[in-house]
Image (cartoon, rainbow, N blue to C red):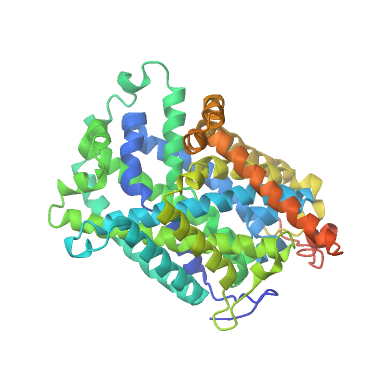
Amino acid sequence: MGTEGTSGGLVRQLSWVHSASVIIGTMIGAGIFVITAEAAGIMGPAVPLGFVLAVPVIVATALVYSVYMSSPLGDHPGGAYVHISRTWNSLFAGYLFMWLKWVSFIGALAVLSTGFGEAMQFFEPLAFLGITEWAVVWVTVFFLLNLSGVDVFGNAQAVMTGLLLLILILLALPGLAFVELDNFSPLFPDELYGSGYVDPFLQGMAALMFSYIGFEALAQTAGETENPRETLPKVFAYSTVFVGALYTLVTLVVIGVLGWEGAAATDTPLTEAAATYFPLGTAGIVAIGSMLAFATSLNSTFMVPSRILYMFGEDDIVPDALTHVNDRFNTPDVGLTITWVLAVAVLVTGTFEFALAISLAALFMMYVAHSVSALAMPWVRPELYERCNLRFKPWVLAIIAGFSAIFMGLFAWQTIALDSFGPALETLLSGQIRAGLTASPALLIVVWSVVGIAIFVGYKAYRRSQGIEHDEDRILRAVYEDEEPSTVED
């Protein structure tokens, strides 16, 4: 395996197998073990249909990423930050959306590690530590694993993802023989759809999208993947289709075996369904699968914030100390350490809801901005588009990106809960800070945006006070200005 270094000291040690493990392991997280119950309570028997209809949205969004990853930008970490900022020629435009994502990922780390701690309680010998204590242990484990080298990170992710897939397939495939078609009739029961079809279906699909959230973490591995401009676009496209098919299979079995009411009434729908046809040690197998799901999600989620900070530092919008790469392990040790400290802090203080509350809305907003940027790229940044290896006709890209932006916008609207802004603001102004902020994702997004803007403007002003010139135009073009235009068009 090659170890070709990037300009920042990162090394290219991830193969396509590692890349597939990152995106699949991130998507097939713990959500699949519980999200079916929540979705069944909203959508009823239409949950598998919801997953089928979600696939084109995710694939369209993945294709947008694939186009960008096939360009010279695909050689660098940063993901949507680099893509948006270079399309609109504005560091701030990319920064603001990625800042909100960075905040949400810190909250996600705390929640995933807490879920891991809860899963540990299933095995009585492991209950000698409480949930929070186990959460701190696992955050630390994955901090050390990520710090120890991107090859260690990638190999661990590949092994864990392979085992997780094996368990899910082992549990789901036999269940097809026990599916009762009557459990899907009526597909839209009056109890849930009596007042209309659109709202319940959109709400259900927004919940199902939680199972896909974070798939774009793959883009953060660009600086450490072998031949990323060829590898990552293919992995984005194929992996999202595969995961969509697997989700549909699992939910088809769960609803088909338990019925939608039975699935909605349990916290462990996959366990309950599998126990009817795979009784031997089902709960233990599912518990192990759940732990693996938390582990794969934690591993890749821990990697993301450090690479975001790395690119912020590369672009001089935060101190360049955040770009420091460990001489021995070739990993961004400062960024990883900051991520670990913040994750542990929100765990022990129980404040992770301040970050988690914006996670879905922030990511949907980022997807919208990213897709709109891709739609505009052939016109506003044609010199960059000409360098994409995967290059559709501009009108074809507009359809793909527009489709993604519209549906991600609908999901964002569902999760922002704008109508909660006023009451939450009143609660906040009355002095109930915690209750007010956590009552409205819209209000919390505004607050975190103000914090992010203050950091951006403040550091820029500090550099100016030190007599340091910030040549934004040079920074923006540096990652692709020396590339030769591509001649491949699809």
Quadrant assignment, res 83 = bottom right
Residue 359: percent from left, percent from top: 51, 45
Q: Left or right: 322 with respect to 48?
A: right
Residue 323: image quadrant is bottom right
Q: Which residue is found at the position 51% from the left and 53% from the top?
A: 105
Residue at the extreme front of the image, as rendered: 431
Residue situated in front as seen by the camera: 365 or 117: 117
Where is residue 52 drawn, in percent x and y?
42, 40
Total labels drawn: 0
Question: Given the current orientation, which residue lies at the most extreme bottom position?
Answer: 328
* Image position of 327 (left or right of 243): right
Residue that appears at 43% across and 28% down: 201
Question: Percent x, y for residue 264?
Answer: 27, 34
Residue sitting at the far left: 280
Is residue 168 visible in the rendered structure shown here? Answer: no
Is residue 453 in view from this perspective?
A: yes
* Quarter where residue 400 is shown: top right
Work out whether 101 lies above or below 464: above
Residue nearest the viewer, comparing 189 with 470:
470
Residue 434 lies, with reference to residue 386, above or below; the image says above
Comparing 75 with 463, the one in front is 463
Pinpoint residue 295: horizontal percent, then vertical percent.
37, 62
